[in-house]
Amino acid sequence: MIVPTPIDTLMLNPLLDTLAEDVMGFLNEIQLNYPQALSLASGRPDENYFNIEEFPDYFGIYVDWLATASGQNPEKVRKSLGQYNRAKGIINDLVVRYLAKDEQIKVAPEDTLITVGTQEAMVITITTLCNRDNDVILIEDPAYVGISHLAIIAGYQVAPVPVGEQGISLPKLEEKILACQAQGKTVKLVYVIPDYQNPTGNAMPIENRRRLLQLADTYGFLILEDNAYGEFAYQANSPLTLKALDVNKRVIYLRSLSKTLYPSLRLGVLVADQQIEHGGKLTALSDLLAKTKGYITVNTPSITQAVFGGILVKNNFSLKKINAPKIAAIKAKRDQLLASLNENLTGENNAWARDISWSTPQGGFFLTVSVPFTVAKEEVIICAENHGMIFTPMSFFYLSKGGGQQIRLAFSNVSKEEIKDAVHRLASYFKTKINLTK
Amino acid sequence: MIVPTPIDTLMLNPLLDTLAEDVMGFLNEIQLNYPQALSLASGRPDENYFNIEEFPDYFGIYVDWLATASGQNPEKVRKSLGQYNRAKGIINDLVVRYLAKDEQIKVAPEDTLITVGTQEAMVITITTLCNRDNDVILIEDPAYVGISHLAIIAGYQVAPVPVGEQGISLPKLEEKILACQAQGKTVKLVYVIPDYQNPTGNAMPIENRRRLLQLADTYGFLILEDNAYGEFAYQANSPLTLKALDVNKRVIYLRSLSKTLYPSLRLGVLVADQQIEHGGKLTALSDLLAKTKGYITVNTPSITQAVFGGILVKNNFSLKKINAPKIAAIKAKRDQLLASLNENLTGENNAWARDISWSTPQGGFFLTVSVPFTVAKEEVIICAENHGMIFTPMSFFYLSKGGGQQIRLAFSNVSKEEIKDAVHRLASYFKTKINLTK
């Protein structure tokens, strides 16, 4: 019964076909095809603040710090940094001081894992906690597609819960949990981005945060809180993270450093201070997560961890001072974007634009524009081709069908001059489009 | 119907419980509990050859190389290295020159992915190719547990195929494939470590390599070839890798750099030059793998990639010269280990040891000792406690029940003096044990 099988689709995970279209690939392609177009599509951080040339200095600072702390000579420390290291990470003691100082999150080093970005932290968390047969992962809709696409190709069940100006809809969340329970399913994880959400740019108010934590207690789920943009707040007194408010240990916290430092470090912090009854004894969830990490990437590169460790030592465990100029710069860009939208889309001369509106984000990298027509993929090509400007349709971020008349503008990695130009071009696209659909 | 669920085992992936015991955790614990014991348990590479202090220089060499190659100024190149990068990697053009030069593997840059170690490459490959319901992944038994444990917690079906002095048993492989087919299952991937296998230390002869490639054609499976030890050959003319022999593109090749350079770089190379019929058109498998990688770690850190890139540029795309002293050193350790085993376990004075035998590895980090008694976990503690020496029972590496009367000795990260002492201690344990069991 020898049947030679050619290398065809049968050789693939069939779940790949259930993924939504590869929208990130599409946007990359557009940018390659229209190199002259100004893009407000990508939420990449501003390269002018990376200071990547300083990384050997920070590595050296960490080596000296560790040599002093451990009583070893620097040469021995350096050699040890070339070896395999702990799956949980090597700079956890420094990182918890940063979390306490900058984010009022108080956890022990053993409650944390240093991961290869928060994307790996999501893989580790879902793989450790979830059961493909019975569990449903609830995800804010729209949201960053990293979590939903990962869950789908890994064979997990996901379901959307609408997210709006007040963050995830709490009534819809309860409805969905009850619906899942009625079908014999368990909602174990609820994924949220409370701070300056990607893609909406909205932040969850403090009272909703408290209420979400109560719901986690009531219904027995864990919250997977993804924080990549929290410190990019344009005014003081933004609410604490869910993790900082988490008395009953209901929150697993993902702290991305891609925007806070730079993306190519590929560092994230996973905070899990829960204890789990497992095999008859109480086990730290973080220990189980570390075992899973051993089968994903073994451990996070020591060099990049040491660089982050050096940055923390040098800055007395707070990134606030080094991030202040970045935050001021992005606020100035937000202000420019709002001014340009006002200039091009409001007032007597722009009566045609009366049905266009936009959000005023209080932090983060993103702003939402609502338009009186449907913005499909083809519109991105038309705007790039005829008007030299690239945006992202909001529908790209939806698990459900939604966001058809909205676009996301990212203002993080463009100059104020480019924002002015880009909005001018976008307005000319809007005007043409509205005239055509009249 | 509101039922509060406490955080208990129900919150976990039930597949975690199906894993074999955490033997690596056990060995780490033993080493912590018996810090004075000499350990031949760990296959870590020798730290004396890491030269981690040179990494900023290599980074600089790569920046200069890329600046020249791309016509950009070094400052701009450096900034771009802080940004998100391609999921496939940034140094693929350099890596294919290394593969061609050192390993006679000829592929295009687009056929490769730079991964966070080969462990991530396994996650990517299995996630992209396999179907949990119908596919069975065949794995050499015994083998490095990274592949089997990953597959098990991710919900895939795995089955063992015996591996011996000639590599994976080809008759048993055919038997297993036919048995799977009879059950309506597909064998899509066969995982092998042809060169100086972990844990056996054996290499697959050239004729078996050719025959395995024929079987892949006949039965339509892909071979997942894991190469971490291939260049640590103690004599010239060791056989080519399966990938170098792979005319019909049946091999996905994993090239670890953890032993070749140093583990904390966490770099692996995934080579997949297959084309797949997908969605009505021919797609490069590497493109699909890159999409999956986007949902595991987004991309591999640029800093570590740039360091490897700099090493390749500096050494004219060959690691042979910088690895020659490492290979000479490990061969000298193998020789010492063989001499010490002979001295302590053969000859008239050691007649008690007549039923103990061992392999003579021709490369790699490991040697197998066969003993006339069963070596369970408890024996590791007894040997550490009473004789001050730590080894690894071979049974730790088996998916099936096997290896009960064998142990693995790793000689990679110990000095020749330590080997002498450790074998002396091991012999005293053997003698005590054999006298007890008489």
Image: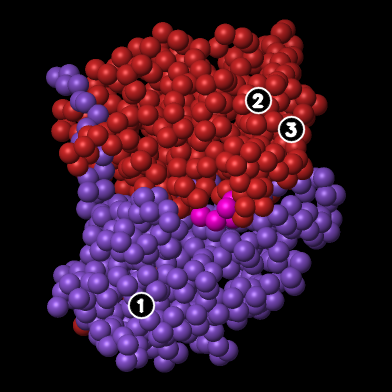
Chain colours: A purple, B red
- Distance Cα–Cα, label 3 vs label 1: 53 Å
Secondary structure at numbered mark 1: strand
On screen, residue A36 above or below A180: above
Can residue A380 be seen here?
Answer: no
Q: Amino acid at mark 2?
A: Asn
On screen, residue B380 above or below A66: above
SS assignment for the magenta stretch, majority: loop
- Distance Cα–Cα, label 2 vs label 3: 19 Å
In the image shown, does A417 or B407 lie closer to the viewer?
A417
At 32% across and 35% down in the image, what residue appears? B284
Asked if residue A366 is among those painted magenta in the image, a careful observer would answer: no
Label 2 or label 3, whichever lies nearer to me, is 2
Q: Kindly identify which chain the residue marked by label 1 belongs to.
A: A
Question: Is A311 left, or right, of A170 in this rendering?
Answer: right
Q: Quadrant of the N terminus of chain B?
A: bottom left
Secondary structure at numbered mark 3: helix
Question: Is B240 left, or right, of B186 in this rendering?
Answer: right
At 75% across and 37% down in the image, what residue appears? B51
Residue B93 image offset from top left, x and y in percent: 52, 33
Q: Residue under circle 3?
A: B49
Can residue A326 be seen here?
Answer: yes
In the image, the segment drawn in magenta is: B80-84
- Distance Cα–Cα, label 1 vs label 2: 50 Å
Q: Kindly identify which chain the residue marked by label 3 belongs to.
A: B
Q: Residue under circle 2?
A: B316
